[in-house]
Image (cartoon, helix red, strand yellow):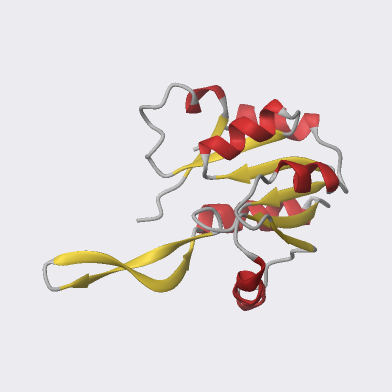
Amino acid sequence: MLDGQKLTSLKCRMKKNEIITFDFDDTLFSLAEEKVGSLWTASDVLAPIQQIHDMLFQKHSEGYTIGVVTAREMWNFPQVEEYIKDHKLPVSHVRCSNGGSKVDILKELDTTLHIDDLLSVVVEASAAGISCMLVDDGRHAQNKEAHKFERIFVNNR
């Protein structure tokens, strides 16, 4: 979990009415798992990651503009919009990077903070001067590079 001191420190560095962006896949949701015979397999159900949804609503209530920047291709845009609508997320901007880097989009939006589950995205965006937080469901536990970044620990399984 993000401790209170780090969250307070983060709040002090940020100005209200700035944009905070969230990744889509494995940040706002994870694929629900279902048991098929003796095996667990990912289903087509997009299960919200509640800690991230709570953070998104909290930041919106503090006056921040919320955006989604996803690596998905444009043809997936309707699914992203549908998820946002179904979960009543207060998102003002949705951008797809079509599998490419998110950095140009984050710069164009003048993102104050980007939240993503992929360490490679967090590393690249941070190198470009964009503040980031890493969503960690346990897969980054042994990665020393991940420990350089503020992390949000989630339990999405």
Q: Nearer the viewer, residue 105 or 135?
A: 105
Q: Position of residue 151 (x, y in %)?
A: 53, 35
Q: Seen in the image, is 14 located left or right of residue 76?
A: right
Q: Is residue 108 above or below residue 128?
A: below
Q: Nearer the viewer, residue 104 or 13?
A: 104
Residue 61: quarter of image: bottom right
Residue 37: quarter of image: bottom left
Q: Nearer the viewer, residue 101 or 131?
A: 101
Residue 149: quarter of image: top right
Q: Seen in the image, is 108 located left or right of residue 134?
A: right
Residue in the picture at 53% in, 58% down: 25
Q: Is residue 95 above or below residue 79?
A: above
Q: Is residue 20 above or below residue 149?
A: below
Q: Nearer the viewer, residue 21 or 88?
A: 21
Would residue 84 be seen by someone viewing this image from the given angle? no
Q: Position of residue 156 (x, y in %)?
A: 40, 55
Farthest left residue in view: 38
Residue in the picture at 74% in, 30% down: 128
Q: How many marks?
A: 0
Q: Position of residue 157 (x, y in %)?
A: 34, 56
Q: Position of residue 65 (x, y in %)?
A: 81, 54
Residue in the picture at 49% in, 38% down: 1
Residue in the picture at 64% in, 33% down: 124
Would residue 148 be seen by someone viewing this image from the given angle? yes
